[in-house]
Amino acid sequence: MIGCAADCDCQVGRGTMSKSADTKSGLEFGPIAGGLLAVALILGGAARLEVLSTLLVRLVAIGVLVVLVARQDSFRSLGRHWPAFILVALVALQLVPLPFGVWSSLPGRQLEVDIFSQLPNPHPWMPLSMHPPGTFNTLLSLLPPLALLMSLPLVGLTWRRRLIYLLIAIALINGVFGMLQLAMGEESPLRLYAVTNRDSAVGLFANRNHSASLMACAIPFLLWWAATPSAKLPGSSRGLLAAGAVCILFISIAATASRSGIVLALGATLVSILAYHGGRLRRLSWRVRVGVIVGAVLLTVIALGLFPLVLSRFAEASPAEDLRFLVLNDLAGMARAVFPAGSGFGTFDVVYRGYENVDILRPTYLNHAHNDLIELIIEGGLPAFLLLLAALIWYARTAVRAAAARRQKRPEAELAVAALLAVAILFAHSIFDYPLRTPALACVLALATGLLLPPVARRARRGALSD
């Protein structure tokens, strides 16, 4: 949602990217975008406000935005990011103080009105947000993905490939790092966050589900790379390297014990193989195809067998007993109570306490809805819902154009497929969790969306998105 664009059809719809090469602005801005992406992926693995590393990511993003503002050519791409700017404006407007007669008439504000009626100043000006500090934190959290998204049109094709390789490399490092954590036990000094899943491999993240989501997002890009022609490395060698990397990622995802991560990884692998290597599979003999299927099954069994915690998590509770399903009625009540204005972005934790069902109270608290689509509507109301709908329509249109471009054998469409699959993984995961609340995965979404946008400046020299 952070980066749809009205005119980005030119990338996969009109085939201009296959005619473009590195631009002067791309050569200059590629390292800056790469630095921001690396910082976000390495330090942005938590969604909590008080984590110091999150502040560092935001400071780097502010520096990048300052450089962008100072560049005249950066303004040429501003029109492509109108949904991102609308989202920022929507969050900022929720912090603007409103007269008592306005904010007190908003849905869900009766408790505040009753409280203020007992105070010396019963008619203060208040913002739409029911928890302004949380909304201000949300506004700051938009800075890293916004900076990366605005950077991508200024990045040439060579550096775009390098950003993808950087994402894959850090995803692999994240997986290996997580397995080291698991090997060293729950008190491993390699765990980077105090509030974390200590019985699982979390890698560079605080939450095992978010760690698994990053690695699942890397799989489509790996299989895109394996299918991309190259004069430097034969296709068979690429295929073996990609297969080995996917195995590492898959085993690392199993080590997280994330149920959603395992399902998303399996789906991403299957769809990516069909998208990039389906033709090759059809040309193989039936014996080879059976061998591939048997190998995949064995890899799954081995991965699950290495980490018994995975099986126990799948068996530990039915969906009806999972807290995220038990609170759905409460969440629906919240959404109705504050619709259409919403409670304000970043207010869920505070506002939910007034709607929590005492029959399902537990020692732990619900800091997010574990369904970002519902939480978006609760916090942003009707405007956020309409913006989300516009984003989904844009991604759907882009997918249709990418499919048409693939039928015409346009090379730029192959990368568009991988980017759209990464977006689909993050959106699907958002139905059961809140991955985009972390700077790391918000920047992955920004990267995937930005790869669907063509560079703003081009040279006449013809180039393709391959090594």
Image (cartoon, rainbow, N blue to C red):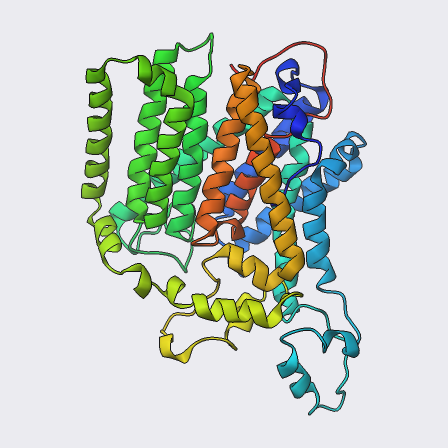
Give coordinates of residue 257: x percent, y percent: 30, 49
Q: Quadrant of residue 463?
A: top right
Q: Is residue 281 above or below residue 151?
A: above
Task: Work out whether residue 73 or residue 16 is closer to the camera in this orientation and state it.
Answer: 16
Residue 148 percent coordinates (x, y): 63, 38
Which x, y percent locates residue 51? Answer: 52, 57
Using the image, determine if residue 57 lies above or below residue 289. below
Q: Residue at x 57, y 58 (%)?
A: 376
Residue appearing at x 23%, y 27% in the figure: 293
The residue located at (21%, 33%) in the rendering is 297
For residue 382, side relative to residue 422 (left or right): right
User: Does residue 346 appear to the left or right of 430 in the view shown?
Assistant: right
Q: Residue at x 55, y 15 (%)?
A: 408
**Residue 51 visible at all:** no
Vertical relation: 444 (above or below) 102: above
Looking at the picture, does residue 15 appear above or below residue 182?
Answer: above
